Amino acid sequence: QVQLVESGGGLVQAGGSLRLSCAATGSILRIETMGWYRQAPGNQRELVARITIGGTTNYADSVKGRFTISRDNTKTVSLQMNSLKPEDTALYYCKFQVTTSWPLKAGDYWGLGTQVTVSS
């Protein structure tokens, strides 16, 4: 069983910063990709940023230059969010592509989400 736990959300004024973290626990052999997604009320869930095991990153156009994703260790990823805007307000989820050691299989795992609210 793999579990992802997010932390670091909160309320911040426009122009401010927040740092989100997501840590995985369980019988993990390998984490191929780590990503952050977000979903605002009435909207579909969208990719914010993703990083591969090799360090390749990609970002949504709306956050390029403001957000930075990083792998803190083999099981933890962070998202540094600067120059936040009201339109960044959403529930932020992490998603890992994981190969478990027992049973030996690959799959996607999601966290429960952490709320980010940016006031104008």
Image (cartoon, rainbow, N blue to C red):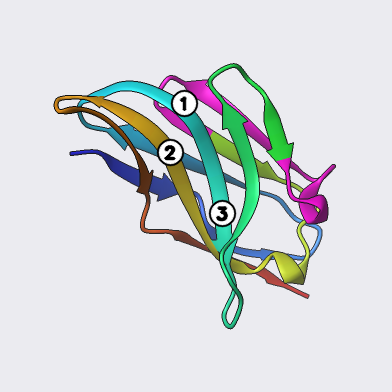
When asked about the image quadrant of residue 100, the answer is: top left
* Magenta run includes residue 60: yes
The residue under the point 38% across, 50% down is: 110
Q: Which mark is residue 37?
A: 3
When asked about the image quadrant of residue 10, the answer is: bottom right
Label 2 neighbour load within 10 Å: few <14, some 14-19, many 20+: many
Task: Identify the mark nearer the N-term, 1 or 2.
Answer: 1
The residue under the point 34% across, 43% down is: 4
The quadrant of the picture occupied by the N terminus is: top left
Relative depth, front residue between 17 and 81: 81
Q: Determine whether the residue tagged by mark 1 lies in a helix, strand or loop.
A: strand
Label 3 neighbour load within 10 Å: few <14, some 14-19, many 20+: some
Q: How many marks?
A: 3
Q: Would residue 71 appear left or right of 81 to someone viewing this image?
A: left
Residue tagged by mark 2? 96
The residue under the point 65% across, 43% down is: 49
Q: Amino acid at mark 2?
A: Phe
Q: Would residue 53 appear left or right of 112 to someone viewing this image?
A: right
Tell me the distance, in whole angstroms, between the alpha carbons under discs 1 and 2: 7 Å
Task: Identify the mark nearer the N-term, 1 or 3.
Answer: 1
Q: Where does residue 113 sit, x and y in percent of width and height?
A: 43, 59
Q: Amino acid at mark 3?
A: Tyr
Relative depth, front residue between 61 and 73: 61
Tell me the distance, in whole angstroms, between the alpha carbons under discs 1 and 3: 16 Å
User: Does 76 appear above or below 94?
Assistant: above
Q: Where does residue 41 sit, x and y in percent of width and height?
A: 57, 80
Q: Determine whether the residue tagged by mark 3 lies in a helix, strand or loop.
A: strand
Residue tagged by mark 1? 32
* Magenta run includes residue 50: no
Q: In the current view of this chain or complex, which residue is farthest to the right? A: 65
